[in-house]
Every structure is written in C-alpha cells, then in structure tokens.
Amino acid sequence: MLPLYYALMKYYSTVDEACVEDAMEALKGTYSHFKQFKKSSLTEAIMTAKSNGLLDESRFDLDANNELRVYYKVNDYGKKMIHNYIKG
C-alpha cells in the first residue's frame, strides 16, 4: 500500500481532472481510516503539489452547497515526476 499522499498523486495521474472530493471518493476504500484522510489535509497536499509544479488548476465550479470546488489536472512535468518516483 502506498502512503496516502503518494496514492493521491497516483490517482491524479490516472484521471483527466478531479477535485478533492473526487479523489476522496476514489481513495476512501483503502485510506478512509487514515488520520490525514480529511478534506483539509488532502486539499493542502494538492495545493503543495500545485506549488511544486505537479498539478495545474483546470476549472472551478460550485457544489450543491454553493461551495467552491477547484479541479486539478496533472501536467506533463507532474506525470513524469509521479511515474519516476512513485512506484506502485
């Protein structure tokens, strides 16, 4: 099993784009019992990946509660780095 944040980056490398809620839904079966498996922690990890040049913002929308959702996608540099450094 990959560490949670590695699994998050691997997930983003397999989809065209996703918001944090999409990622949580995809990873909950394996990682929902992890202490850091909460929206705020995963959002921070995504924002760190964006700051490090692995992810780009792709679009924005509002969810059913009128809360902003930000979608991210892996760029070419991010794909290369994720596949080179995160095996599994």
Image: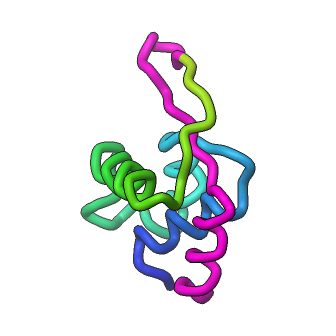
Q: The C terminus lies in which quarter of the figure?
A: bottom right
Residue at position x 35%, y 56% from top?
Answer: 48
Quarter residue 58 falls in: top right
Closest to the observer, 85 or 24:
85
Q: Residue furthest left?
A: 35
Residue 69 spot, x, y in % from top left: 49, 27
The answer to whether 68 appears left or right of 14 in the picture is left
Q: Position of residue 53 (x, y in %)?
A: 48, 58
Residue at 35%, 65% in the rendered image: 33
Question: Which x, y percent locates residue 5?
Answer: 41, 68
Q: Is residue 19 left or right of residue 83?
A: left
- Residue 83 percent coordinates (x, y): 64, 80
Residue 31 picture quarter: bottom left
As displayed, is residue 2 above or below residue 19?
below
Q: Which residue is located at x 54 percent, y 53 percent?
A: 55
Q: Which residues are magenta?
A: 62-88
| Image coloring type | rainbow
Figure check: 6 above or below 50: below
Q: Is residue 20 magenta?
A: no
78 falls in the magenta region: yes
